[in-house]
Amino acid sequence: MMNVLCRLRPCSKSAIVRNFSLTSSCLQDQSCKLLVIGGGTGGCTIAAKFAKRLKKGSVIVLEPSSDHYYQPLFTLVGAGVTTVEATRRDAKSVLPSNATWIQDSAECIDPEKCVVKTAGGREIQYEYVVIAAGLKYDYDKVPGLREALDDKQSRVSTIYSPQYCEKTWADIKSFKGGEAVFTYPDTPIKCPGAPQKIAYMADSYFGKTNIRSRCNITYNTFMPVIFGVKKYADALMKVVAERRINVNYKTVLKEVRADKREAVFFNTDDRSKLTTVPYDMLHVTPPMSTPGFLSSSPLSDDTGYLDVDKFTLQHRKHPNVYGLGDCTTTPNSKTAAAIAKQSQVLEQNLLSSMSGGQPLRQYDGYGACPIVTAYGKCILAEFLYDGVPRETMPINQARESTLAYYMKRDLFPFLYWNFMLKGNYHGPEFVRKIINPFAK
Ligand code: UQ1
């Protein structure tokens, strides 16, 4: 398969190279010490770290998009608290100036030859590669979904995309009562808390505008539980009971019939058992998967994710390949806070590999999920592998808190843009040592 996939295609001039002097008339054949695939949270952070450490021209970042979004705020865009433009920066302004940005996407990777071929027809030779390619949204897996999202009048939206998250706010704001339906798909997803956060925000808005008694809110989730960490699941069960939000487990969106404003769901215990529900607004979390160059490469496992050691973040077969963020097999929650911690481990381990040593640092699975439960309220979930809580503050973070809400809205974006993307933030462990020194 690799040979077919990796056959070189004619060079296209459509993709742009920034910060790079080209001597060849064709844009092919570049080489670098470190190639970073993806300029999102993981890629940008790692590129910043290594661009500081290695000499100019050593780091190439391969990223097709000219926009970089702070995705954790998309829930609050959907709730009308901020705008999508406030979550956006030019990719050029966040990628390190000491690295070479190639505005193109990976088409295939040959880890034996250490070469990546791009959609624009380049070949990039690397000594080391960090794969931080994220996840893509498979709207077409749900018949009718893409058309419904693109139709402005459909009342179907998703906060997962910068293209559609303002539509969620338009739908919530103009809701006059009836059925508000929220979904969670049957694939791994980024930020597993977000599909229910937006349901809580809708509930809060309907309450504020005195229409809540006319609204039915339903959260249909593939999961058998409300949240993967018991401590927070217990707290969230109380939230859904208090707010009278209906929760159906093991229930997955199969089709959207926008013309009739109906959504069809199947039950995972019996896939032939279908339920058709009418909606007056439908918030969809789309199925997600890794990009094709990764899922079709020998670097992925049979689920399509980059097969790294869950502690060292090094590839299990190719020691010059590392990965972080949403596209790897590490069984943590896929959040920005997880990447903050992973980036530190990956940096140390990759440096060790570069100097002929072994990767000795271990990622503990840390992830954090500020679950907004209303305007001004948030449960700040923080945990390690296997659902072990790991809280920063000396209070019970499973309780709804106003402080946590403002941390989510204001502090975390500030830390992200000013410290994390520059490679200078590794999560709140250092704060925890100071303010919560007696915790386990
Ligand atoms: C965090 O460090 C972080 O990174 C900037 C986030 O951004 C998305 C978070 O959402 C959270 C919860 C953390 C954890 C930090 C503290 C202080 C609990």
Image (cartoon, rainbow, N blue to C red):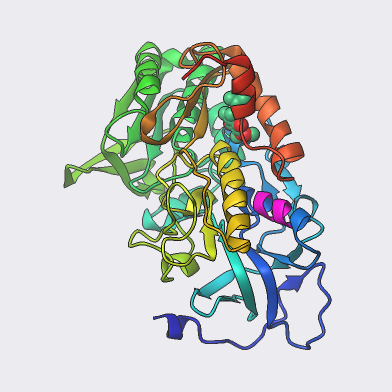
Residue 354 in percent (x, y) is at 62, 62
Residue 393: in magenta span: no
Q: Position of residue 384 (x, y in %)?
A: 44, 33
Identify whether 383 is placed above or below 66: above
Q: Quadrant of residue 355?
A: bottom right
Quarter of the image where one finds residue 185: top left
Front in this rendered view, residue 295 or 75 = 295
| Camera-side residue of 223 and 415 | 415
The residue positioned 45% from the left and 35% from the top of the image is: 195
Q: Please say if 273 is above or below 126.
A: above
Viewer-closest of 51 and 301: 51
Image quadrant, ligand 1: top right
* Quadrant in the picture for the N terminus: bottom left
Residue 49 colored magenta?
yes
Q: Name the residue: 52% across, 73% down.
A: 109
**Is any atom of residue 405 visible in this view?**
no
Inspect this view and state whether residue 225 appears.
yes
Q: Is residue 165 left or right of residue 138?
A: right
Q: Give percent across and percent down for residue 251.
A: 27, 38
What secondary structure characterizes most of the magenta part?
Answer: helix
Q: Position of residue 197 (x, y in %)?
A: 48, 28
Please give the count of numbered marks on the rendered protein. 0
- Which residues are drawn in magenta? 45-50
Q: Camera-side residue: 71 or 156?
A: 71
- Residue drawn at x 42%, y 17% is 214
**In the drawing, does residue 145 fall left or right of residue 437?**
left
Q: What residue is at 69 percent from the left and 72 percent from the top?
A: 32
